Image: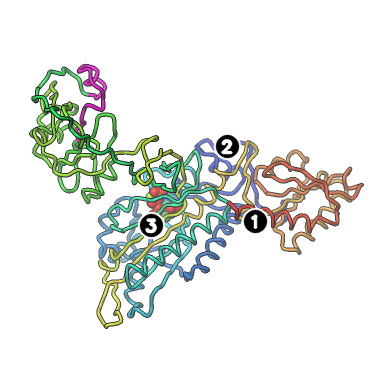
Amino acid sequence: MRYSQFMLPTLKEDPAEAEVISHKLMYRAGMIRKLAAGIYSYLPLGLRVIQKVERIIREEMNRAGAQEVLLPCIQPAELWMETQRWEEYGKDLLRMKDRHDRDCCFGPTHEEVITDIARREIRSYRQMPLNLYQIQTKFRDEIRPRFGLMRGREFIMKDAYSFDADEAGLEKSYQEMYKAYRRIFTRCGFTFKVVEAETGLIGGTASHEFMVLAQTGEETIVSCQSCDYAANIQKAEAKRTRPRAKGPGKTPNPLKKVETPDMKTVADVTKFLKVRPRDLVKTLIFETDQGVAAALIRGDREINQTKLGTHLGCEDVKLASDDVVLGATGASKGFAGPVGLSVKIIADYSIEPMVDFVTGANEQDAHYINVNLGRDVKVDQFADLQMVREGDLCPRCGKSLSFFRGIEVGHIFKLGTKYSKALKATYLDENGREREIVMGCYGIGVGRTAAAAIEQYHDEDGIIWPMPIAPFQAIVVPVNNKIAALMKTAEGIYRLLSSNGVEVLLDDRDSTPGVKFKDADLIGIPLRLTIGEKNLKKGLVEIRRRKNGETTLIEKDKVTETVSALIHEEMEASLQG
Ligand code: ATP
Ligand code: MG
């Protein structure tokens, strides 16, 4: 490709709204342009990267035995009503009407459509295992589209769906995808972690997220320093402290109400009563789709609402409004407590060993001291509700847990029979019995993967593409277009490399070397071949590696073999991770 004929509108300035480096650099490198919030056009350079990522995904999905399909973007509402998701999906689902006034939507995901195919086509256990995937445009009307391709509203996703006769089959399909995903992200050149993720209400038995490690990541990853335990913070557990054996003679003190005028926070109350935050039990009132519930947790810890929702089996869990708190406890926020409370009480395991603790008294400006479980408080259920903290102990090995930031590029999920049940996708087993198909689903954000690569690989001059997903592998830069010999050599090298299968860009623009070098760095091409007058007189060409700035001089007629060797080396290096 010749730069002069290639649409590559690089910019010196960062776009005003870009918050993260990948967004800034994709814009400045002329890869994308914004049409509307979360909706982008891919310019030629951007599309080349997207297609590289897609090629790696295709190769690995095909290798794992999955077959490519292409499903419709526009989907009829009826299908979504069958799974209840027409109501449940909420505002992320872009709904529209056709000319006959029929409701439809732009697919944010394709469980309904693929299960509809399965229920029509799969009759017998002999037709499984089956794994179908597509690479296609999704639309999710995200409440906060941001970070460019990282969280768009319209975006390209690879989604795959597996169909098996039973759980054991699903387990095998899931492991195949797990391995394929590892290969995909390794081949893209990432440093990543696979973490356990929340399965939530989809009711699956397992889910893993593939996280690219980056400071700007939206996700918090909890990872053991010693063993391979890693989980999304929403799912992460910590080793539980055992209930303390009550020493002989340690009888609980009598319950006592004390005045705590205007003291609503843990800090205020504990300071006033001269106790530690961990000697207090916080009572948080939640509104859920099953009514009002109270969650108890030690004063120095926080509730993980996702865990609470999963425990209760509720989609929607939110902190109660002032009115609801008043109605449920008889007092304003800050004075709620479990003594005499009539709503369902779920307590975090952390309070199990506590004796003589402090709680709100469900009365304005009052708290109880010497509260004890059993005698004063009737807990309905104990559960793990706490948000894990850095330094907590690993639930597997007991060593310390650390936190990382990550970008979720892939997500695999055991669905079980949720969709086959709703859509009646059944098959006949060996004994002629009708059974529900067991499903899994597997997603990768293609644009987010490209963006994540930039988050992980860049410097102050621009992008540093890992070789496997670089839009071009090499760029040939003649430093002065006015010198015929330079241009001729550059053209010759460009043609030779191209005919040897190297993806090469020739910077044939009539610009200063400074401008050409800056652009080459900005767009992040791994190898730069500089054709300069002085070197050329000695029959030499300079090769510079973008990733470390290393330059070497090579003989003009060794260019192809040297470039091929370096490409090979960098491809291999990214495979080693
Ligand atoms: P997130 O928690 O980031 O919203 P998700 O759990 O909704 O992601 P999935 O439904 O599992 O995502 O979709 C599969 C993959 O699609 C994700 O792992 C991610 O890489 C990508 N993806 C999801 N939403 C977006 C988006 N708004 N923009 C770009 N990529 C996305
Ligand atoms: Mg989402």
Give the residue type that dot 1 points to. Glu
Q: Are marks 3 and 1 in contact (CB under 8 Å)?
A: no
The N terminus lies in which quarter of the figure?
bottom right
Mark 3 vs ligand 1: CB under 8 Å? yes
Q: Residue at x 15, y 29 (%)?
A: 248
Tell which circle, 3 or 2, labels the residue nearer the N-terminal end.
2
Q: Is residue 506 visible?
A: yes
| Distance of label 2 from label 1 (alpha carbons) | 33 Å
Q: Residue at x 33, y 44 (%)?
A: 237
Give the residue type that dot 2 points to. Asp
Q: Which residue is mark 1?
A: 572
Q: Give the magenta range.
A: 265-284
Q: Residue at x 38, y 63 (%)?
A: 74
Neighbor class of circle 2 (other Cα within 10 Å; few <14, some 14-19, many 20+) is some
Q: Secondary structure at mark 1?
A: helix
Give the residue type that dot 3 points to. Pro
Which one is in front in this view, the residue at disc 3 or the one at disc 1? 1
Q: Which residue is mark 3?
A: 108
Q: Residue at x 50, y 49 (%)?
A: 192
Does the stretch in magenta take in 270?
A: yes
On the image, the x and y values in percent for residue 276 come to: 26, 23
On the image, the x and y values in percent for residue 520 come to: 70, 45
Q: Which residue is mark 2?
A: 14
On the image, the x and y values in percent for residue 254 come to: 8, 25
Q: Secondary structure at mark 2?
A: loop
